[in-house]
Image (cartoon, rainbow, N blue to C red):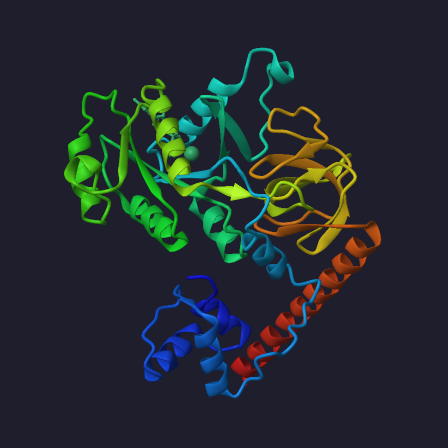
Amino acid sequence: KEGITVAELAKKIHKEPAKLVKDLFMMGVPTNQNQSLGSDEVEIILAEYGIEAKQEVVIDPSDFEHYFEDAKNQTEHLESRPPVVTIMGHVDHGKTTLLDYLRHANVTEGEAGGITQHIGAYQVASDDRLITFLDTPGHAAFTTMRARGADVTDIVVIVVAADDGVMPQTVEAINHAKAAEVPIIVAVNKIDKPTANPQKVMQELSEYGLISEDWGGDTIFVEISAKFGQNVDELLEMILLIADVEEYKAQPNRLALGSVIEARLDSSKGAIATLLVQHGTLKTGDSLVVGNTHGRVRVMSDDSGKRIKSAGPSTPVEITGLQESPEAGDRFVVFEDEKTARSIGEERASRAQEERRQMTHHVTLDNLFETL
Ligand code: GDP
Ligand code: MG
């Protein structure tokens, strides 16, 4: 059904989603937060709460949420985009080995002088199709980014060592992926080891609802050796299979929107940010606001360090030209002109400063009361 979800409506009318679901139930409309409501239903709800339906919604240009909402609700001029994948799993189960294997398998000899620079995200080609991998170390980065509103991952690959089985951080990874509501692929790793027991991994994961297709479930399991590259091609094929089903799309022909994967301050180049373009096309010279800072895209390079002039949806890039270093998980929005970007950037910066000031104030008061 076309329309607005219960959760979206709750946000618009400043109600708790759970409260709205409860009230709807009392009105005889059983729903959940993700369910779409038709305009008739919305009208009844608004009447019940005594809210004017035809109210003009005032859009705050410094609130980034609505730019992303708008882009997500686009139905026209969409083109397919590469899936964005995060690899998670227990420590020592082979995440880094897999990411390294993928990265090197994709670096042609002599490219960028044979030096692979690290930009926190990169693309791999399989059958002439691209897959974007986020090279974010640890689960914390994933949760931090999500907490900051940057739901950039389409697919989570959970690596489980076949000689070790399900461990605490495996469970944590499953929970993160489930919370993000993204498809999971299980990569049963280290199958080259004589002690590997993939059946045991399957058994253990079934207790968390991840049941392999062989066992009548719908979770894709791939047995790999990240160290030797065995079956890694198949893993890529499975990622593309999910991409075929999910049909990830974005509109390339608009001002770019996206998220910060990582950022740092370089003594000579200033702020260097790795961005993931999520909607539109980012171009050199673009004026943008990134988190609470702003600037213009001065130099833009791809994951192999090559300078590029434009980057479409799902492309990770590294840029310079920002006033300050943003934070991982910050959103970026490109604006028509430098003046707008500057004023919105400055407004966001001063608001953030005010929030920080109030927070310090609170802490001080709390401490004061504690000592009384
Ligand atoms: P991470 O903590 O998940 O990033 O794990 P690493 O990638 O650092 O791997 C931990 C250890 O397992 C390293 O010594 C790797 O060489 C080893 N390892 C990773 N994948 C494989 C594999 O497929 N087979 C074997 N035999 N060892 C592996
Ligand atoms: Mg690692």
Left or right side of 155 for 224: left
Q: Could you tell whether 247 is left or right of 345 in the image?
A: left
Q: What residue is rendered at 72% in x and 53% in y? A: 293
Q: Residue furthest front?
A: 40
Note whether 142 is above or below 369 in the view shown: above
Q: Quadrant of residue 366?
A: bottom right
Residue pictured at 40% horizontal, 63% vertical: 34
Q: Quadrant of the N terminus?
A: bottom left
Residue 327 in view here: yes
Q: Residue at x 70, y 62 (%)?
A: 62
Number of callouts in the render? Answer: 0
Q: Nearer the viewer, residue 353 or 21?
A: 21
**Viewer can see residue 226:** no
Q: Position of residue 142 (x, y in %)?
A: 47, 47
* Quadrant hosting ligand 2: top left
Q: Is residue 45 left or right of residue 57?
A: left
Residue at the limit of the structure toward the top, as seen here: 109
Query: In the rendering, at what x and y percent does residue 248 appear?
Result: 47, 41
Return the residue nearer the eye: 292 or 80. 80
Residue at point 63%, 29% (across, down): 302
Check the image and report above or below for 51 versus 106.
below
Q: Is residue 363 toward the left or the right of residue 292 in the image?
A: left
Q: Position of residue 270 (x, y in %)?
A: 75, 40
In the image, residue 22 lies at what x, y percent?
35, 79
